[in-house]
Image (cartoon, helix red, strand yellow):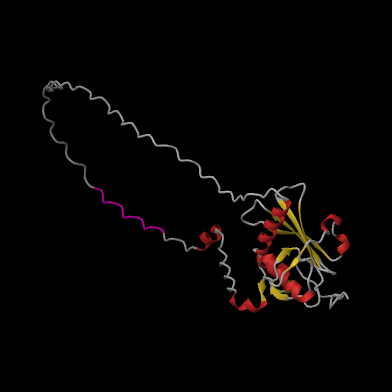
């Protein structure tokens, strides 16, 4: 007998993705920079942290906003406020002195002939030494994190599930499974993109589709879309061929009945 799960409160939604919170799903209260409170579901913790929201239990660790610098007065206003410098007192006029008596001028003598200047040879300007040649530095290229892609569909699916289980999304799905039960799961290679695998994890009231890039070694797993109705999933992606094992990891061949 299938257990029907419904939202436990029609008005409790996630303030990040707008999805209705399911019964038993874990949420966290966050505070925005203006002090407003927000409810965030478990799948949107990273997006709330990136938006600058702070968990309510860690609000006391947030540093106080630095005070605003004192507004400076305009330059013209500051010049007007400066006290006027006192004008210098005029110097007393010098007393009139009698004109000096004319002195007798000596008799003019014949000017001596200028001595011949010795001839100097102009020294040539020094030739600058040649600068040593330096090899141009090679441009450092940005390292590309590229990983090899398997050739067969089975190997692609196995590699994709290994990448998913090593990501933070695996812990989120395992946490939802503890509240909502075992999910359906389907991992299928994308025919249009040979290096990509689509992974769908679904319950009766919600589903998530992840995109796994096998050639990306830095951030291969990303959430592509999510919804509330199973009929919204593409029929080609509803070939359930995987499920969760006892440790909450997605594996092939544990399909949910």
Q: As drawn, which residue projects farthest toward the front?
A: 253
Q: Is residue 90 left or right of residue 245?
A: left
Residue 243 falls in image quadrant: bottom right
Report x, y in % for residue 245. 72, 69
Q: Is residue 30 left or right of residue 110?
A: right
Q: Is residue 8 left or right of residue 189?
A: right
Q: Is residue 39 above or below residue 194?
A: below
Figure disc tally: 0
Position of the N terminus, as image quadrant, is bottom right
Q: Is residue 103 above or below residue 54?
A: above
Q: Nearer the viewer, residue 97 or 13?
A: 13
Instruction: Using the rendered image of the protein, determine whether residue 39 is visible from the camera's viewpoint.
Output: no
Residue 161 falls in image quadrant: bottom right
Q: Is residue 133 left or right of residue 152?
A: left
Give, as a single range, the part of the protein colored magenta: 87-96
Q: Residue at x 81, y 61 (%)?
A: 240
Q: Residue at x 72, y 47 (%)?
A: 194
Position of the C terminus, as image quadrant, is bottom right
Q: Nearer the viewer, residue 15 or 107?
A: 15
Report x, y in % for residue 183. 79, 68
The overriding secondary structure of the stretch rendered in magenta is loop
Report x, y in % for residue 13. 80, 72
Report x, y in % for residue 252. 74, 62
Q: Is residue 194 above or below residue 48?
A: above
Q: Is residue 199 magenta?
A: no
Instruction: Using the rendered image of the protein, determine whether residue 9 is visible from the camera's viewpoint.
Output: yes
Q: Nearer the viewer, residue 19 or 106?
A: 19
Q: Is residue 95 magenta?
A: yes
């Amino acid at each position: 007998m299938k257990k029907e799960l419904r939202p436990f409160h029609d008005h409790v939604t996630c303030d990040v993705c707008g999805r209705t919170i399911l019964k038993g799903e874990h949420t966290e209260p966050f505070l925005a920079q203006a002090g407003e409170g927000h409810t965030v579901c478990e799948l949107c913790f990273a997006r709330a942290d990136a938006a600058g929201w702070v968990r309510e239990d860690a609000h006391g660790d947030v540093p106080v906003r630095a005070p605003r610098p004192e507004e400076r007065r305009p330059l013209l206003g500051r010049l007007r406020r400066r006290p006027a410098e006192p004008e210098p007192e005029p110097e007393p006029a010098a007393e009139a002195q009698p004109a000096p008596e004319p002195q007798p001028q000596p008799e003019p003598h014949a000017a001596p002939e200028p001595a011949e200047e010795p001839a100097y040879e102009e020294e040539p300007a020094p030739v600058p030494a040649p600068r040593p040649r330096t090899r141009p530095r090679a441009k450092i290229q940005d390292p590309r994190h590229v990983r090899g892609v398997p050739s067969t569909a089975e190997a692609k699916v196995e590699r994709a599930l290994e990448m998913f289980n090593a990501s933070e999304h695996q812990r989120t799905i395992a946490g939802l499974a503890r509240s909502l039960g075992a999910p359906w799961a389907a991992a299928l290679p994308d025919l249009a993109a040979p290096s990509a695998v689509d992974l769908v994890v679904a319950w009766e009231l919600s589903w998530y589709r992840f995109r796994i890039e096998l050639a990306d070694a830095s951030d291969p797993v990303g959430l592509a879309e999510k919804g509330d109705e199973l009929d919204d999933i593409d029929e080609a992606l509803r070939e359930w061929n995987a499920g969760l094992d006892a440790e909450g990891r997605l594996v092939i061949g544990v399909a949910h009945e």
